[in-house]
């Protein structure tokens, strides 16, 4: 294919809204064009890569025994009402109404639609296990669409759903998809690691997210170099040790004036103590009731864990007036010892079990209590894991210190159990003609996010470095002297030979300076570059170099040997 025949437009400048390298390069290389906030058009080069990724996903889904279907983007509200997610999905779901006042959603995902299909079509145990999937555009009204294709309002997702006879079968389906995901990402040239993830309102349900480790990632991941334990910070656990207190364990309770010192740091410096001598107390409004949460002073509450532990539907920090009502003091001076609301539930982090000699807010403005023994002085109801894991925390599996990494979630596999099949009464008949509820799993890949994640993981200061499996074209032939017939002939010969060998090739036939052409080739990131010019041909041949090699690695090869060399480089 000739460059001059394709709609390619590279940009020198990065778009103003691009914060991360992959977003800048995506737009500068002319792969996509912004249509609106979180909305993108895929241009010919971007489209080619997107289709290659889709093809890999398709092949691996088919290899895993999944069957492709496609379901409507426009989903009737009745389906969402059956699962009660019409109410719980919240503002993230685009809702609309037709002329007859029927309500619809633009599908943000499709558990409901697929469960309804399985319910309608599966009758007998003989039809199970069944995994069906689609590749369809999804819509989410993200609070903050950003990072280009990473968090957009409209994105391409592959979503698969498995239906099984029993838990054992569901387990098999889950690991089958897990393995298929490993293959998909590795074929896309992506290092994606599976990490344990939070099951959301599905509680302890087994689920893994596949993450591309990158500083630009929005998720934190606790990572153990020792044993390979990896978990999203929303879920990550640590081996909790009770931090040594800097005070004697039999200290007596003592009220100390701490005027105007509200934050742990302020009180610490006021009293000349370390922040881990403090117990930080926060009041949450949990489904309309106040709950106090106590954690070590140098830590943060993991609200995902808290919400799960309390089995809460709605959870948010209490307002200043709610705090005062519950404790009798302003935030900053509250604590677990005798709050105004004596029946308020108090929960504490597991690492505080048995803690003594601590400092807490006195539930009285401008005062703290020193020498607190939590078991002796408070009515803490539960001690459980409630904090966010930090770098240096102890791995719950092997006991080595963990580090925190950033990750981009490109896919997720999820054991759903019977949440949807029960709501839809999706049952099948066993061999004994008994009715049983199907057991379900769901499996998503962000196809468009994956495209950009590959760029985030494979680029340098000059541009993208595509893995050859998904590059828009595998080879670029730089035709330096397009007007010279002999030179153009060599370029055409290479183009034909490469195409016939199944290697998609683009010939840069533009009348441009070599410097401009090389810059564009590096920016777009074709895996192999072949330079065909009059000077080179007289000197012995064409110049071949891989995108990820230094200029000094360039090989001079006679045109009839070029195909073999290129093949070996790819
Ligand atoms: P996130 O936590 O990033 O919002 P999610 O966990 O809500 O994602 P899932 O419901 O698991 O997303 O969707 C499956 C996949 O779809 C994700 O793993 C991700 O790769 C992709 N995805 C989700 N939201 C978006 C989005 N707004 N833009 C692009 N891709 C997305
Ligand atoms: Mg997810």
Image (cartoon, rainbow, N blue to C red):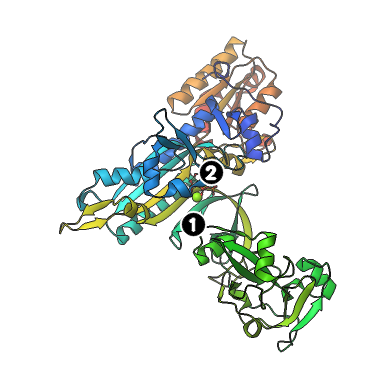
Marks 2 and 1: which is nearer the front? 2
Q: Which residue is mark 1?
A: 200
Residue at horizontal 50%, vertical 18%?
A: 493
The part of the image, by quadrant, that contains residue 386 is: bottom right
Q: Secondary structure at mark 2?
A: helix
Q: Secondary structure at mark 1?
A: helix
Residue 59 horizontal/vertical position (percent): 38, 40
Q: Which residue is mark 2?
A: 91
Question: Is residue 466 positioned above or below 231 on the image?
Answer: above
Q: Is residue 314 visible?
A: yes
Q: Is residue 240 visible?
A: no
Residue nearer the viewer, 331 or 163: 331
Residue nearer the viewer, 296 or 230: 296
Q: Which mark is residue 453?
A: none
Question: Is residue 305 positioned above or below 244 on the image?
Answer: above
The part of the image, by quadrant, that contains residue 522 is: top right
User: Which residue extends farthest left?
Assistant: 432
Residue 370 horizontal/vertical position (percent): 76, 80
Residue at horizontal 37%, vertical 45%?
A: 112
Label 1 residue near ligand 1, CB within 8 Å: no
- Image check: 551 left or right of 563? right
Q: How many labels, in total?
A: 2
């Amino acid at each position: 294919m000739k460059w001059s025949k394709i709609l390619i437009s590279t940009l020198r400048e990065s778009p103003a809204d691009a914060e991360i390298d992959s977003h800048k390069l995506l737009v500068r290389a002319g792969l996509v064009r912004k249509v609106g906030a979180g909305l993108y058009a895929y241009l010919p080069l971007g489209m080619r890569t997107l289709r290659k990724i889709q093809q890999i996903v398709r092949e691996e889904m088919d290899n895993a025994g999944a069957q492709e279907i496609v379901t409507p983007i426009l989903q009737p509200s009745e389906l969402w009402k059956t699962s009660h997610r019409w109410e719980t999905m919240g503002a993230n779901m685009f809702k609309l109404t037709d002329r007859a006042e029927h309500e619809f959603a633009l599908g943000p995902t499709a558990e409901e639609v697929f469960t309804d299909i399985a319910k309608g079509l599966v009758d007998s145990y003989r039809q199970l296990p069944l995994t069906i999937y689609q590749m369809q555009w999804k819509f989410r009204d993200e609070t903050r669409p950003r990072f280009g294709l990473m968090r957009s309002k409209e994105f391409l997702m592959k979503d698969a759903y498995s239906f099984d006879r029993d838990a054992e079968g569901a387990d098999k389906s889950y690991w089958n998809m897990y393995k298929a995901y490993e293959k998909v990402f590795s074929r896309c040239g992506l290092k994606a690691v599976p990490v344990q993830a939070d099951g959301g309102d599905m509680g302890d349900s087994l689920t893994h997210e596949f993450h591309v480790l990158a500083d630009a990632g929005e998720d934190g991941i606790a990572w153990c170099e020792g044993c390979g334990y990896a978990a999203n910070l929303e879920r990550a656990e640590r081996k909790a040790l009770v931090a040594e207190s800097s005070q004697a364990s039999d200290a007596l309770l003592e009220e100390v004036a701490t005027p105007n010192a509200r934050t742990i740091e302020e009180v610490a410096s006021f009293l000349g103590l370390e922040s881990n001598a403090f117990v930080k107390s926060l009041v949450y409004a949990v489904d309309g009731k106040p709950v106090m949460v106590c954690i070590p002073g140098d830590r943060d509450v993991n609200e995902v864990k808290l919400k799960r532990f309390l089995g809460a539907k709605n959870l948010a920090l209490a307002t200043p007036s709610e705090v005062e009502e519950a404790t009798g003091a302003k935030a900053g001076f509250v604590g677990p010892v005798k709050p105004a609301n004596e029946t308020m539930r108090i929960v504490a982090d597991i690492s505080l079990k048995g803690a003594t000699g601590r400092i807490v807010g006195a539930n009285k403005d401008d005062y703290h209590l020193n020498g607190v023994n939590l078991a002796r002085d408070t009515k803490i109801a539960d001690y459980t894991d409630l904090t966010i894991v930090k770098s240096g925390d102890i791995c719950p599996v092997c006991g080595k210190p963990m580090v925190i990494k950033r990750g981009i979630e490109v896919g997720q596999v999820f054991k759903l159990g019977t949440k949807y099949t029960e709501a839809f009464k999706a049952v099948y008949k066993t061999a004994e003609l008994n009715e049983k509820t199907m057991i379900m799993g769901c499996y998503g890949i962000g196809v468009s996010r994956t495209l950009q994640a590959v760029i985030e993981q494979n680029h340098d200061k000059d541009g993208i470095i595509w893995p050859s499996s998904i590059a828009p074209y595998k080879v670029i032939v730089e035709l330096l002297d397009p007007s010279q017939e002999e030179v153009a002939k060599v370029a055409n010969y290479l183009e034909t030979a490469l195409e016939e060998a199944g290697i998609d090739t683009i010939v840069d036939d533009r009348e441009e300076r070599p410097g401009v052409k090389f810059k564009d080739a590096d920016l777009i990131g074709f895996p192999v570059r072949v330079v065909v010019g009059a000077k080179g041909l007289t000197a012995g041949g064409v110049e071949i170099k891989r995108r990820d090699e230094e200029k000094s690695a360039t090989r001079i090869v006679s045109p009839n040997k070029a195909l073999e060399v290129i093949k070996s480089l790819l």
